[in-house]
Amino acid sequence: MDTLEHLFGTLPKWLVRKNDPEKSHLAAERVDTKSLERIVYEVIRSHPEGCISDEVQAELKTLPYSSVTARFSALKRKKLIYVTDEKRAGKSGKPQLVMRAV
């Protein structure tokens, strides 16, 4: 895990669009993306058979939905996780793609 530590965290400027209101830019400065990415990654990594978004959210139910789901794209972009072609039914019954840690 220590070898991956430098990969966690996203600069605030990548969390907002240039034309977003100032309050959005200020909010982006306060998001601890390093910790959130590490936490979400560890949950996904703890599922060697892969997991869907609903399963990650269920394990991190104390965190807001958007704090969890926003980390998926950052982790994919950094090639720490990948999405398989496999799908599983989410709690709504709709299929969700399975994610795995690299």
Image: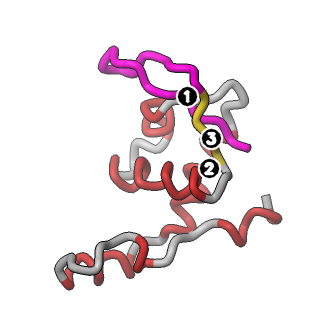
Question: Hey, which residue is sitting farthest right in the picture?
Answer: 3
Give the percent coordinates (x, y) of residue 91.
35, 20
Which numbered dot is residue 98?
1
Say which residue appears at 40% left-offset and 42% top-offset: 61
> Label 2 vs label 3: CA separation?
11 Å
**In this rendering, is residue 27 above or below 57?**
below
- Indicate yes or no whether the magenta region holds residue 51: no
Quarter location, residue 22: bottom left
Residue at 30% x, 20% y: name it: 92
Give the magenta range.
85-102
Asked if residue 12 is positioned above or below residue 58 in the image, the reply reads below
Write down the residue under mark 2: 41
Mark 2 vs mark 1, CA separation in Å: 14 Å
**Crowding at label 1, few (<14), some or many (≥20) Cα neighbours within 10 Å?**
many
Residue identifier under label 3:
82
Q: Is mark 2 on a helix, strand or loop?
A: helix
**Residue 44: x percent and y percent?**
62, 40
Quadrant of image for the C terminus: top right
Please name the amino acid that badge 1 sits on.
Val
Most foreground residue, 31 or 58? 31
Q: Return the disc, 1 or 3, that comes first in the chain's sequence.
A: 3
Q: Quadrant of residue 9?
A: bottom right
Residue type at numbered disc 3: Tyr
Residue drawn at x 39%, y 48% is 62
Give amino acid for label 2: Tyr
